[in-house]
Every structure is written in structure tokens, then in C-alpha cells.
Amino acid sequence: MTDRIDRALADLGLTLPEAAAPVAAYVPAVEAGGMLYLSGQLPFRDGALVIGRLGDGLGVEEGREAAKLCGLMVAAQIRAALGGFGRVRRIVKLGVFVNSAPDFTQQPQVANGASELMVALFGEAGRHARSAVGVPVLPLGAAVEVDAIVELGAGALD
């Protein structure tokens, strides 16, 4: 699986960032009962946090890109927690939180940035259930935050 992910990243012209350290009193990942639970990940571009509110300064495409960056950080946290991707069986669920103006209703389209990245990286195993929720503010003013639940197994899916 790790080779597959590396190839997919290269094909997309993407590089996994270093897994971000927690910003408060929690851990980035917990493995329990054959699952990996990932804390919310924020969007970083070139080491800088992508901030702003969708529908109030940021458009859908900027939000999609922020969600994609969160998805990259989810993948980085998986790698950091497991030492690679060989035990990943499936991306089960993403929770996507969108910093939204009161009248912004395109959270699902923003969330697609993370969802489409999971499929691009993990293939069919990247298809997942999802929530896309508008919120009035996110930590540090982030535009988007994504958490994840990942099913683990003994071997790679390839």
C-alpha cells in the first residue's frame, strides 16, 4: 500500500507534509479495536495555516483546496501513527468541518476536496462515509478541519 500511495502522490504532484503536532491536550491518533481514530487535521500550505471563512472571503474552490490539504495531513498522520500505509484496509469515515458564513450552504462541495483525495490515494478503499458541517469558527481561524476513522488489517490491499 505504501508504494501505491507514494505513486499516487507523485502522479498528483503532491508531497505528504510532516504530521502536525497537536495544538492542545489530545493525541493525533488512537488505535483501538482494529480502527485508527484521527483527530481533526487543519490545512497547511507551505507551513502556513489556511485561514478564513467560506462565503465570506473564501470561495468553494479555495475551500476544496483547503479540504484537500487537510486530507494530506490525514494521510501524514496515518503514516506517522502506523509507520506506513500497509495496514490500512479502508477509510471508513471523514468528518469535514467548514468555517462558514451564516448563508454558506456548499459544505459538501468543499468536503469533496478531502473525499476525492482519499479515493485518489487509496482507490476503492478510500471511498468512505462522510459528514460535512458548517461551523461559525474553527481552531486558529482555519478554513476547514477534517477528522477520520480508518479500518486496519494485517496486510496491504494491493
Image (cartoon, helix red, strand yellow):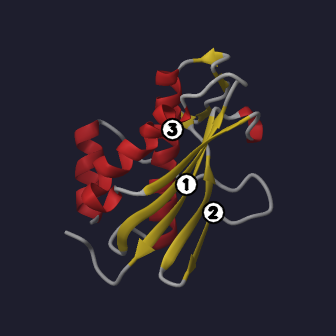
Occupied quadrant, residue 52: top right
Residue drawn at x 26%, y 55% is 123
**If you read the primary sequence from the N terminus, does the residue marked by circle 1 or circle 3 appear first?**
1
| Mark 3 surroundings: few (<14), some (14-19) or many (≥20) residues within 10 A | many
Residue 6, position as x, y percentages in the image: 28, 53
Give the number of the mark in front: 1 or 3.
Answer: 3
Please identify the quadrant where the N terminus is shown. Answer: bottom left
Q: Which residue is mark 3?
A: 67
Residue to which mark 2 is pinned: 28
Q: Nearer the viewer, mark 2 or mark 3?
A: 3
Q: Tell me the quarter of the picture where residue 89 sits.
A: bottom left
Residue at the far right in the pictured view: 25
Name the spot of residue 127 as percent of width and height, x first.
34, 56
Give the mark nearest the N terminus, 2 or 3: 2
- In the displayed structure, 16 sits above or below 109; it is below
**Disc ID at residue 19:** 1
**Mark 2 surroundings: few (<14), some (14-19) or many (≥20) residues within 10 A:** many
Q: Amino acid at mark 1?
A: Ala
Indicate which label's residue lies in the foreground, 1 or 2: 2
Dot 3 amino acid type = Ala
Q: Residue at x 76, y 33 (%)?
A: 136
Residue visible at 55% across and 54% down in the picture: 19
Outermost residue toward the top in this view: 57
Q: Is residue 84 left or right of residue 47?
A: left
Q: Are marks 1 and 2 in contact (CB under 8 Å)?
A: yes
Residue 107 in sight here: yes
Question: Can you say whether 76 is above or below 64 in the image?
Answer: below
Of 7 and 39, which appears nearest the observer? Answer: 39
